[in-house]
Image: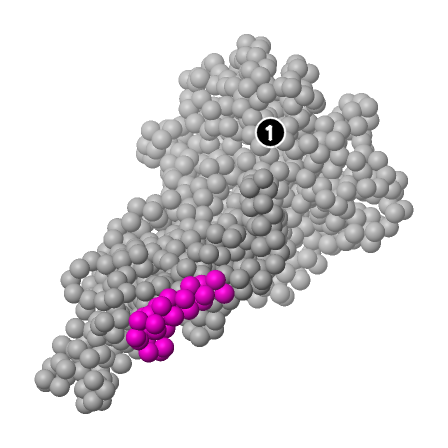
Amino acid sequence: MRILDSIRFRIVAFFDRSQTHSELEEELRSHIAHRADDLARSGLSRREAERRARVEFGGYVKFTEQGREAVGGEFLESLWQDVRFSFRKLRQSPGFAIAAILTLAMAIGANAVVFGMLNALFLRPLSVPQPESLYSIERGANKSQNQSYPDYLDLRDRTHTFDGVALYNIVSAGLDTGNNATQFWGYEVSGNYFDALRIQPFLGRFFHDADEHGPNSAPYLVISHAYWHSRFRDDPGVVGRVVQVNQHPFTILGVAPAEFQGTLLFFFPDFWVPVVDHEQITGNNILKERRDQSFIMTLGHLKPGVTPAQAIADLNSVGAWLVKSYPKDDADMTFALARPSLAGDLLGPVARGFVSALMLLAGLILLAACANLGSLFAARAADRSREVALRLALGSSRKRILRSVFTEAILISLAGGAVGLAGSIALLRAMSVWHPIPTYPIVIPVNPDGNVYWVALLLALLSGILFGTVPVRQILRTNPYEIVKSGSGGIVAGSSGRRITVRDLLLVAQISICAVLVTASLVAVRGLIESMHSNFGFEPRKAFLVETNLTMGGYRGDRTLPMQKRMEDALATVPGVESVGMVDQFPLSGSFGSRDIYRDQTSDFTPANIVADVMTFRISPGYFRAAQTTMLMGRPFSWHDDRESPRVAVVNRQFAKSILGSLTNAIGNHFKLEDGTRVEVVGITEDGKYYQLTERLRPALFLSMAQWPSSATNLIVRSEREAQPLTAAMRLKLKTLDAGLPFEIRSWNDELSIALFPPRVATISLGLLGGMGGVLAITGIFGMAAYSVSKRLRELGIRMALGAQRKEVLRAALGRPLKLLALGSTAGLLLGMLASRVLAYIVYQANSRDPLVLCGVVLAMLLMGLVATWIPAQRALSVDPLILLRED
């Protein structure tokens, strides 16, 4: 019965708080009044009796709070009181509030942006039904995504754990709808691609396995929703329309749904075409006869109840059968599974490592911000020590005071988190519509989702708790009697004396983090500068590129080489053109071809006897002159090096040294290719960069295009003319040759944007983080220096009155902050030299021990120290001793 009465009382108290509070107040006042009556009867005056009764009663406010807590239902009300009190305090210090909110907004915004990238590129699943059971198939020790088409057929037909295995591969083709022929990008896919992914069309239908009946048997096209909108203006009549793809008739079957952008997150396709049409799309037919040509990617849904480990075991059993059946072609056929994410995980540990490093550095920014705010909160607690002491003396509990401090910290952190999240959302959305490489349909789909919002909220709450904890020890050690008696601050938070305080440690940590970020950003800048002025093995300046594939114009077989010669000769006649050359793929273009190299004495062409896998380029005789690649020895090709003459090659210096033994013996030496062809070396060129800027020296092989024809036609045109008139003249010449052949013209420097994209992103990202760290360091040093000067104004005035010199006053006022700056900068520089090593994977020639980088970090930290201490120094030097002493 008592329990029910207690519950009923608490419920009534919760919903009728005003009456309950009045009753408590009345009860406490009656106790004091009764005691005052007793004292008055003993002979004391009424006024003295009431004062004595209140003193004997003790902390009236404390008993009131305890009584309300005992009644219950006071948590929400007291929390609301703390919120209102914190708002009033922040309104009284708008400068502090704005600085704290912006500091935290900057740090949380940086973390939200980096996590948004990490989430979108690596954690977010593909936009397909049941993405949790979808896996990409990786092959070999290097986790390659590529398979050969014959191997894919065996995997598809012999595995029992997948609900369909599909293939896809990026291709480009020429589209002619009757107006202007253009190049468009898409996928060649297996007939079961859409069925395996469980995708339904937005318009029309998809192709299926039943539509394939051998090579070039399924002239069907599915276009993306975005391409349907941009090219066909949302015309529903596009279904069933026949268009020319590489001069072959293809029927548009349907339109994909808007939310489906393919199976590579960074690549938004225009179309999907059956892989059985590979010859019509690419101009070659390597589907069934070449198991050593790995160019397709595979993925599929696991069957219900199948675990990834079971699927891997199933794949490995098929791999063992392939190795046994085809020992010459399939050497390493062990398999693994991966979640399809950024490029189907094509970029591998490099991209993951870089984004993870950015996440680490952004976390350091947040820690620096928390250290900054913790230092400010410690100083704020010291300045409010008398207020805290009075509250304690009036009976308020330390728990209530700490709760108000944490409430203020959480309010600041939530406000900063909201501002930072708003900025990060705007930046992420801008990045999502950014096309970093205009010539390719490459995007960065980092639109924020619920995960980004939750992480921002979590970081805001954790940050508030973290920097709100800093003054806890100070408040717990507060002695209200001593503070009220002395009339001055009693919470030690400043930097008086030689004792190491919490503020000192926080400032050192903050400056160290800043130095790490500045070091990393300067390493990135230095690497980018080096990449812009390094020796690529070719000269991109004053060179223009004409890119096409003759397959898009319907050229095949013996028609290809004559057309290429005509194109080269036509461009050579353009006024101002100095030289023209041709290559099947540009160096540093993001694509590459390679050949297995064997010794001249080899007769067993198995993988065990491969000497090297070498970057291979097929070129015309004019390539080296147009690219300005230096010939070290021997001769370049001529058009007489054709199919009727012995096979010849030009190799780079690294090829000659690592494979042929030496430069002196390389000319006239021979090696063999994977098909047994014997090739003679007739020339040696300088080394260069072929695939990426950060690669080490690697062997490269140049073959004559007249002996190894290719439909990929990329011309290098060197000229001193202005870009616009030269481009117009070249376009007119090529249209005269074939108006239906799509092509792109751009400068070679623009083409290098692919290779320079990673270091540019690294430089911009780390530069922003370094700038944020610098701002935090400046505010932290300024805060400590200003607080130190304000607390020692009387001492500085006495020093100046006694004749101290200006430098002595500055040393006394700012010596400690500057010592902490030097200590934190040294620690941060050492840490930065280690932390920035991860940039070597992306930034060209990244070296944190570069003297210019070290000098730059020292200079940057020195400038930050000067900027941060300038105002406090001026205040210290402007002290008027007479005014200070008169105030005392």
Q: Position of residue 440 (x, y in %)?
A: 63, 49
- Residue 842 lies left or right of residue 383; in this view the side is right
Residue at the spot 48% in from the left edge and 41% down from the top edge: 352
Image spot of residue 653 (x, y percent): 37, 38
Q: Position of residue 318 (x, y in %)?
A: 59, 14
> As drawn, is 866 to the left or to the right of 238?
left
Q: Residue at x 22, y 79 (%)?
A: 793
In the image, the segment drawn in magenta is: 26-53
- Prevailing secondary structure of the magenta residues: helix
The residue closer to the viewer here, 141 or 175, is 141
Reply above or below: 213 against 273. above
Viewer-nearest residue: 445 or 380: 380
In this view of the protein, can residue 150 be seen by the observer?
Answer: no
Q: Nearer the viewer, residue 53 or 500?
A: 53
Residue for badge 1: 136
Q: Given the image, on which type of amino acid does mark 1 rest?
A: Ser
Does 571 sit left or right of 229 as displayed? Answer: left
Helix, strand or loop at mark 1 = strand
> What is the x, y in percent for residue 783?
32, 69
455 lies above or below 192? below
Vertically, is 696 above or below 326? below
Q: Quadrant of residue 150?
A: top right
Horizontal side, residue 357 vs residue 345: left or right: left
